[in-house]
Amino acid sequence: MAAHEVGTEGPATPGNRVTITEIARQAGVSVPTVSRVVNGRSDVSPRTRARVEELLQRYGYRKRPTSTGTGAALLDLVFNDLDSPWAVEIIRGVEEVAHATGVGTVVSAIHGRTGDAREWMRNLRARASDGVILVTSALEPMLHEELRILGVPLVVVDPAGSPALDAPTIGAANWSGGLAATEHLLSLGHRRIALIAGPPRLLCSRARFDGYRAALEGAGLTVDDALVVPGDFHPESGFTGCNALLDLPEPPTAIFAASDQMALGAIEALRRRGLRVPEDMSLVGFDDLPEVRWSAPPLTTVRQPLGDMGKLAVRTVLRLARGEQPDSPRVELGTELVVRASTAPLTR
């Protein structure tokens, strides 16, 4: 359901620019029905088609030219931040599908600031974007409502908090990933297993922590609060968190870092103290970013399908732009433990 024209306040009148939502309201039909007429679909009754086409002509509605048949020509891809290789993997997946379908992509970062989000919304209106993919970010309810009024379809990837009820979401199996990481360390004989956690405001962080806790409880252990330190998914917090764990009277023998970037920071903290991975400390990350295959040692981690999440997000938003509905409003793609050289059996 493309929003190629930006609506004005109050009822539309000839000469005003109008949204596809307003056309649907006046025609007494659904937005997907108008979208089918706009895109030349045949599955609309002649009477309904004539009524919609009359309104489209009356208000001078113009569909964005496209030869892709997707119903969309420009998508907005919005992150909270773009300073992580994690974001690059999402972008790769988005671009692969967008390029194959002839759809342009605008990438933005809103940095969690209201002013930046409002500026992005102004730019989106100006370029008449046909769809939005929101990644690990949260918009104010008012901005969500503005997207709805504009008729711009929205897909949320890795939702930061409770997503808008009318927005499809795409994520990874974070709970089972946290479970698998911790169970792997338990299987090697480790019992003092620490967690460098992600930001608690993020659903994925909370799910990874819950998986960690479930694995410990399954082994008859409880979470030791002293072994859980905060992080923000960046290397610096992994470095700081690992140092805090090493300063404990009884340090852990293994660490589950809730992101690969934090795991790399932890490796550096251990190196500076003359400690070896995995001989002195076993370590598991989360993401399976390309660079961790070449870390010293190569990192055991939980692979989440970041590229596939980006690809599915594009396919989903394009379906919405055609007036179709996704197969499921909530999708969780599977995660997989990848065992490399950063974990070893407990020897002490």
Image (tube, grey):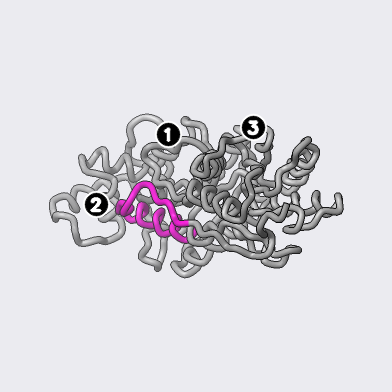
Q: Tag 1 or tag 2, which sits nearer the N-term?
A: 2
Q: Position of residue 72 (x, y in %)?
A: 41, 57
Q: Position of residue 76 (x, y in %)?
A: 52, 51
Residue highlighted by disc 1: 145
Q: Is residue 240 visible to the viewer in this orientation of the structure? A: yes
Q: In 3D space, how far apart are the residues under numbered discs 2 and 1 (Cα atoms)?
A: 27 Å
Residue highlighted by disc 3: 225
Of 297 and 62, the residue lying toward us: 297
Q: Tag 3 or tag 2, which sits nearer the N-term?
A: 2
The residue depicted at 33 percent of the width and 32 percent of the height is 11
Q: In 3D space, how far apart are the residues under numbered discs 2 and 3 (Cα atoms)?
A: 64 Å
Residue highlighted by disc 2: 53
Residue 8 highlighted magenta (yes or no): no
Residue 323 highlighted magenta (yes or no): yes
Q: Position of residue 81 (x, y in %)?
A: 64, 46
| Circle 3 Cα neighbour tier, 10 Å, few/some/many (<14 / 14–19 / ≥20) | few
